[in-house]
Amino acid sequence: MKHLSDPNLHDTHTPHAIATRLAGDISHSYLGDFVLGAIDGVVTTFAIVAGVAGAGYSTRVALVLGVANLLADGFSMAVGNYMSTKSERQVVERVRQAEERHIDEVPEGEREEIRQIFAGKGFEGPLLENIVQVITDDRRRWVDTMVTEEFGLQLESPSPLRAVLATFAAFALAGFVPLLPYCFSIQDADQMFLISALATGVMFFVIGLTKGHVVQAGKILSELEILLTGSAAAAVAYGVGVWLEKIISAA
């Protein structure tokens, strides 16, 4: 987010700079997908590690369940993100086709929609009629305006494939951090769990820092938010593991 004290603020708002920026291709950021995948990967994987530790099972069980979750849940989340992003594109295309048909069948009604949309923005009289004329003289501009103004949709949407790659990569990379200690020959299960918890805390810190950058919010607040969320999930999983182990032992 730019502030008034930014020395480049005026340079980026000259007529030439604005025209160049608006004429360029829209570039979508997939950092949000990466952050979402990373959060889910770390939370779910460490929750499994905590549950296994609470139940007192072997470290091999934690590694097996953790890797299985990493691949299966990561794939599921990536596919879900793919379908969601693809659906957004399909909705825009369906609306465009409908508006194309409406312009052919009821052009005056569609002009009236444009007129009322911009009247609602405060335009009136000859200026309003001029706006309607300019927009409806260009069929593509007319359809684009209906898509964005009437339905509130974006003309350009992120690539489903890139969204999938960002989500799955983040889930797998960040989610593997809690499992790292279990890949080494540390015999003490409690020591493994402690190292895993510390590594997870560091990962939460990194994700919170990145999330704060994405949403332009306080980084410390974002770090605490993610740390508390992950800790709560781990505490629940650990408690459930202890509880189930007692039930199984008593059976």
Image (spheres, rainbow, N blue to C red):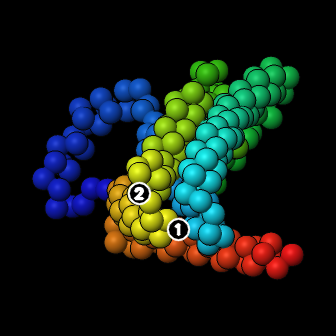
In this rendering, would 219 be left or right of 119? left
Q: Position of residue 225 (x, y in %)?
A: 47, 72
Query: Furthest residue to the left?
Result: 7
Q: Residue at x 67, y 41 (%)?
A: 72
Look at the numbered disc 2 and give the secondary structure of its residue.
loop
| Residue at mark 1 | 230
Report x, y in % for residue 140: 61, 22
Q: Is residue 248 above or below residue 167?
A: below
Which amino acid type corresponds to the residue marked 1 in the rendered image?
A: Gly
Q: Which residue is drawn at the image coordinates 61% and 40% (left, top)?
A: 71
Q: Residues within 10 Å of mark 1 (few under 14, many from 20)?
A: many
Separation of disc 1 and disc 2 at Cα? Answer: 24 Å
Which quarter of the picture shows residue 73? Answer: top right
Spot occupied by residue 118 in the image (x, y as percentages of width and height):
61, 47
Numbered label attached to residue 172: none
> In the structure shown, which secondary structural element does the residue marked by tag 1 occupy?
helix
Residue under label 2: 186
